[in-house]
Amino acid sequence: MGQAASKEDEMEKQSIYASYPGLEQQLDMVFACHDIHKQGKLPYKTIEMILRHFLMQCGFMEYVCRFVDENGKLDLKHIENYLTSKKLMYKLKCCGDSMLTVEEMKDLVITFLKKISDTYVDDQSKWMEKMKSSQEEQGKALEEAMSEYEKNILFNHAIKEQQLLQNNKKLDEWNETIENAYEVQQEVLRQFEARKREKMNISSEKNKDLLIAKDYIEKIKEAATDNRYDNSKCFVYPASSAPCGACTSAGAIMPHRRYKEPRHKKQAVLEEEEKQRKKKKKKKKKKKKRRKKKKKKKRRKKRRKKKEEKKRRKIKRKNSI
């Protein structure tokens, strides 16, 4: 068992040396620099300072701060379980300022590096567990928040839909009332217009009757007072002396026809016609003048075009020559 353990320790040493190239040579050089009297041993205080400096130089400041005691020195209780050499443990525990060799210093360095790597792995696992737990808590919180959000959204959406339905119902009712009121108003206007027309028709009929009666009376008067008919005898009784209050007459009007007017037209009409003829003649003359002007313009344009074409031809001939 002891040989197997020593082999494992040797394998671990070699792996650490491989992960930190030049470590063994560096430790030998540092030990030789501090061993002024060439005794092959250094006190633990010096080795502890070298070890602290080396760990901080490697970038393990955080772990150095975790593994020091109240006085700021490396506390060996953190590496008790890692020390396999009983002799080294005895030296470190019993003797306060014990002298250590190069190999013992190397063992201390390797044990501290093992402790640092193990603590790094433990920290990673703890950090991952914390991350998982925090992610789970965040996921639960997010799920709860999303469920609450969805509930609120659905509730608000349902309320909005109900409000829209109520508003639409109210609008429909309002539109129906407006349409009904408009129809009633139109019906009232129609009835009013119909009554107005009836009154107008009644009044026009009354006026027609009165006009007919007046025309009839006037005709009778004219027939009675007309002096052109000597052989006719016509007389009229007043309505007051006639039975039933009706206007009566006697005698007959001689049939007659309207006197023919001369066929030649009146002078005013002839003058008016003459004026219209003159106007027509003037209009015709103006139209002719306009047409002549247009024709002249067209001719001028044609002449100009011909002249321009002749000039172009001459220029082409000159250029060709």
Image (cartoon, helix red, strand yellow):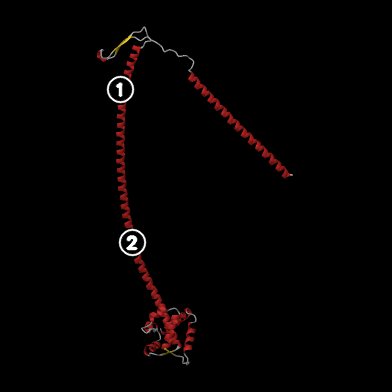
Residue name at image x 51 percent, y 23 percent: 275
Residue 132: name its quadrant: bottom left
Asked if one can make out residue 189 in the rendered structure from this viewpoint, the answer is: yes
Which is nearer the eye, 107 or 123? 123
Density class for disc 1 (Cα within 10 Å; few <14, some 14-19, many ≥20) is few
Above or below 205: residue 171? below
> How far from the left and from the top, in percent, is residue 321?
74, 44
Residue name at image x 35 percent, y 65 percent: 138
For label 1, the SS is helix
Direction top: furthest residue? 231
Q: Foreground mark, 1 or 2? A: 1
> Identity of the amino acid at label 1?
Lys
Question: How far, Cα to Cα, is label 1 from label 2?
Answer: 90 Å
What residue does disc 2 label?
145
What residue does disc 1 label?
206
N-terminal of the pair, mark 1 or mark 2, is 2
Mark count? 2
For label 2, the SS is helix
> How far from the left and from the top, in percent, is residue 206?
30, 22
Which is nearer the eye, 108 or 191? 191
> How far from the left and from the top, in percent, is residue 19?
47, 78
Residue 305: name its quadrant: top right
Which is nearer the eye, 144 or 253? 253
Residue name at image x 30 percent, y 32 percent: 192
> Identity of the amino acid at label 2?
Ala
